[in-house]
Each structure stands twice: as C-alpha cells, then as structure tokens.
Image (cartoon, rainbow, N blue to C red):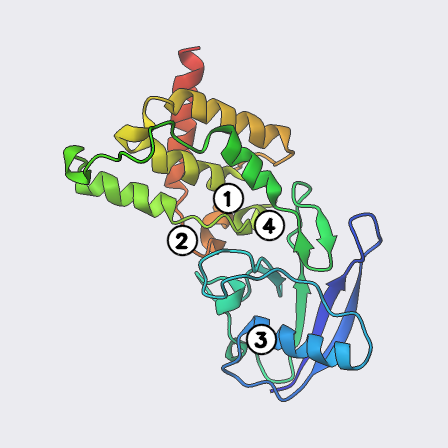
Amino acid sequence: MDFKVKIWRQKNAKAQGHFETYDVTDIESDASFLEMLDILNEKLIREGGDPVAFDHDCREGICGACSLYVDGRAHGPDDHVTTCQLFMRHFKNGATITVEPWRSAAFPVIKDLVVDRTAFDKILQAGGFISVRTGSAQDANNILIPHETAEKSMDAAACIGCGACVATCKNGSAMLFVGARVSSLALLPQGRPEAERRAKAMVAKMDELGFGNCTNTRACEMECPKGISVDHIARLNREFLKAEFRG
C-alpha cells in the first residue's frame, strides 16, 4: 500500500509549526500506524533528514503514550483503540493521511507530534490517591463490595490517561479523565475518607492548569479508546457538589 502522509512538524514549543507531506510506499496492510511511521523515519534518516518525533511505549494499547490525531480523530478512524493498535488496512490505498499532535493549551507541543501531558500527572498528585498503610494489605474478602459497584469502579479505572478526551473536546476539557479517576475511588470504601478533599482538589487543579469546561457534547466518550462513560463525569459533579455544600 502507498500513502501520502501529511505530518505536523514543529522544532520546539516556541517554534512556528507547519505541515510537511511525505510519500511512504510498499506498506503492508497489517502494519500498524506506528510501524508505518517507523518506516518513514528510517527513510528520512537514510536521506539525511530529521525523523518525525512521536511518543510510544508499550505498543499494546495499554499505556496511552501513542497520542496522535489522525485524519481529524483522536487515535485515528478505528473505534476504541489507541494509535498503536490502528492498522493501515483501515486506510484506502493511495490516501493522504493527516497526522497532528493533541491540540490543547494544557498539552503544549514539545516537538512535532509529542506533547507535554504532565498536566494529568499534576491532577493526580492533587488527589488521585488514597492514604493507607502499605505492605500490610487486608485480604480482599474482608471488605465486602457489591459486584456491580466493583465493576463500575474497575470500568473507571480502565482510563489510561492518554488525553484523547481533551484532544476531542471542543473546550479542551479534562472532565472525563478527572471523572474516571475520582469515580474509581469514590465507589470503593477505601476511597471514601478522602472523597470530599479529593474532588475539590482535583477539580481546582484541572481549572488551574487551563483545561476547559464540560458542555456535555459526549465527544470524549465517543473517542475514548477504553470506552469510559460520561456517567463518571456525573459522579464527579455529585462528589464535588457534596464537598462544596459541606464546606
């Protein structure tokens, strides 16, 4: 398969970015999108050019590092997958593919397709944890949790923090990410002691870092590679309001 790949190139955060178009040829249909970029970079290096910088790690759809905006969609045209699990068979032979970094004021571009997502780490540091003794965990059966509640918590915990929700949202909101993190702990007894402080602290940090507001378009839910539901945003709002009313 042959493609034209239109890629955003930007030397650093302060430089003016622009698109450059490259030809990539003889790509296997079963090659992943990142493998296609690897082949392009090998070609650029052989020709003495500057390879395209992009993030990747596990390449198994687990870590969320491969955060690319492909043909106008976060992670590309397939549903519920990260970019590393997107395969070239999803594109037509001869197609022009546009590749961009996440577009969000809270995720500044570092170089080319790499953005700084440490804003998510700062939100987690503000409250996405529980204070318990380590090294002496209780047996799981000592704390009885209804199966349905445990499943909801695990669904929320499936969030990999890739940032697709922010990149997709017209407001650049991080509410789905924060909602998933708050919800996964709020549903469990271990997370209740700090629930009020957690919701207020994480929302405050999200606002401080420049993320936008949620206007319930549900675009985040549609493009989340793990299918995180906006129900968790509703739970975040309830947790936050309870905390506010109680001072």
**Mark found first going from the N terminus, 3 or 2:** 3
**Mark found first going from the N terminus, 2 or 1:** 1
**Mark found first going from the N terminus, 1 or 3:** 3
User: Element at badge 3?
Assistant: helix
Where on the picture, by quarter, is residue 10?
bottom right
Q: CA distance from mark 2 to mark 1?
A: 15 Å
User: Element at badge 1?
Assistant: loop
Q: Which residue is mark 4?
A: 167
Residue at (31, 41) in percent of width and height: 153
Nearer to us in this view, 233 or 7: 7
Q: Nearer the viewer, mark 1 or mark 3?
A: 3
Cβ–Cβ below 8 Å for labels 1 and 4? no
Residue at (64, 85) in percent of width and height: 2
Numbered label attached to residue 227: 2
Question: If the image is split into quadrants, where does the C terminus sit?
Answer: top left
Q: CA distance from mark 3 to mark 2?
A: 25 Å
- Above or below, 128 relative to 10: above
- Above or below, 169 relative to 135: below
**Mark found first going from the N terminus, 1 or 4:** 4
Q: Which residue is mark 1?
A: 217
**Mark found first going from the N terminus, 4 or 3:** 3
Question: If the image is split into quadrants, where does the N terminus sit?
Answer: bottom right
Task: Give the side of residue 98 with respect to residue 143, left or right.
Answer: right
Cβ–Cβ below 8 Å for labels 4 and 3? no
Q: How crowded is the residue under tag 4: few (<14 C-alpha within 10 Å), some, or many (20+)?
A: many
Q: Position of residue 56 (x, y in %)?
A: 57, 62
Q: Is residue 171 visible?
A: no
Q: Amino acid at mark 1?
A: Thr
Q: Which residue is mark 3?
A: 35
